Every structure is written in structure tokens, then in C-alpha cells.
Image (cartoon, rainbow, N blue to C red):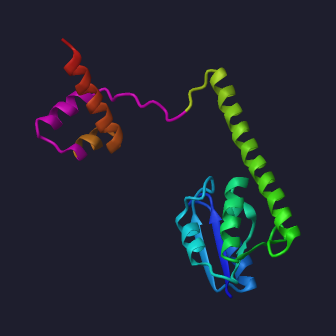
Amino acid sequence: MANIGYIRVSSIDQHIDRQEIALKQIGMDKIYSEKISGKDINRPELTKMLSYVRDGDVLYVESISRLARSTRDLLSIVERLQNKNVALVSLKEHIDTLTPQGRFVLTLFGALSELERESILQRQREGIDAAKAKGQRLGRPIIQEPVNFNQVVKIWKSGEITATEAMKRLNLNRGTFYRMANKKEAINQIAP
């Protein structure tokens, strides 16, 4: 029987320290951690952990939202754990699936987490729609073609300078430079 920990944060900018401290205080035999969205269960460390756990192990998470964001995914993970006779303990919600009450409460919290996520997405969509209605442009800003673009591209295509030098002269990054150059070439091929 082993104590297994699973830690997840949604992005590489976030820190796992708080979750790691909480789990280490209990005493973990092994901890799996990753920085990836919990929108689905296709996560490398989650997959490794689910393959690793054995009969009698206990999986500890700081919060059920770290394990899954949807009720369906949460219940799928819990079912896989139960099939292996592995208990799930969530520290924040004080849930222990070894008990029927723990399994019931886990299902309720899973539904609430899914509702919270859906509410966030709905507010985000509403904000985007409101911005569009006001005429605000969304996404990356449009980069205007530099005044000397055609001249520098002509020099680059003649082989007098490298693409890197052309990018420096135009103050453009690699992607923007090639996108503008390809667009200009496509336009020139269409023009009579």
C-alpha cells in the first residue's frame, strides 16, 4: 500500500508549491505533477499515475479540481481507481472514497466544479461578444508592412543579404517576415 500524490496546475506560469507542500506533509511515496489544462483526461502524468497505482494504494489530491474539471472525467477517473481498489482522498474537500458518503460528496463536488468551469467559459464568451459588439478588434494586433519592405525583400531574394538580416532591417520576427513575404509573392503571382 502506497500514498500517491497527483498535482496539477493549468499553465507553466503557475506554481505547484502549495499543492506539493500539502501532500508532502502527509507523506507521499510518489508524486506525479504536471502543468497542463484539466479540460480533459489526456494528460501524460495523469496517465502514468493511473497506470502505476495498485491495489490498496491511496491517491491524494489537494482538490478535486486538480484531478478533473468535468463530472464525467472525474467519475471516469474514480471508476478506474475503484477498479484497481485504489482510494481517492481530496484534502480541500475532505473527501475519502473508501466511504459511501465520500463517494456521494465527490459526485456533488464534481458537478459543482463543472458548473463553475462552464460559468467561466460562458462569461468569457459573453465578454468577447460584448467587445465585438462595441467594434473592438480581438486577437493579435495587425502589423503594418514596413515602408521599405519591398526594397529589403528584393535585396534578400537576390541573395545579397540573409533572411535574418532582412528581418533585422525590417524589425520583424521570423513568422511575420515570412508571412508578409509569402503574401506579397502570392499577390504578385495573381496580378496581370
* Rendered image quadrant of residue 178: top left
Image quadrant in which the C terminus is located: top left
* Rendered image quadrant of residue 48: bottom right
- Name the foreground residue: 173 vs 85: 85
- Name the foreground residue: 9 vs 38: 38
Furthest residue in direction front, as rendered: 83
Residue 43 position in % (x across, y down): 55, 62
Q: Is residue 124 above or below residue 41?
A: above
Residue 33 position in % (x across, y down): 59, 71
How many numbered tags mark residues here? 0
Q: Is residue 11 above or below residue 135?
A: below
Residue 101 position in % (x across, y down): 88, 68
Is residue 139 rendered to the left or right of residue 151?
Answer: right
Q: Is residue 17 visible?
A: no
- Name the foreground residue: 54 vs 37: 54
Image quadrant in which the N terminus is located: bottom right
Furthest residue in direction top, as rendered: 192
Q: Is 142 a magenta residue?
A: yes
Q: Is residue 186 visible?
A: yes
Q: Is 119 a magenta residue?
A: no
Residue 111 position in % (x across, y down): 79, 52
* Rendered image quadrant of residue 166: top left
Q: Which residues are magenta?
A: 139-164
Q: Is residue 33 above or below residue 25?
A: above
Is residue 152 rendered to the left or right of residue 4?
Answer: left
- Name the foreground residue: 187 vs 31: 31
**What residue appears at the point 74 percent right and 70 percent down from the top-left corner?**
62
**What residue appears at the point 23 percent right and 27 percent down from the top-left corner?**
185
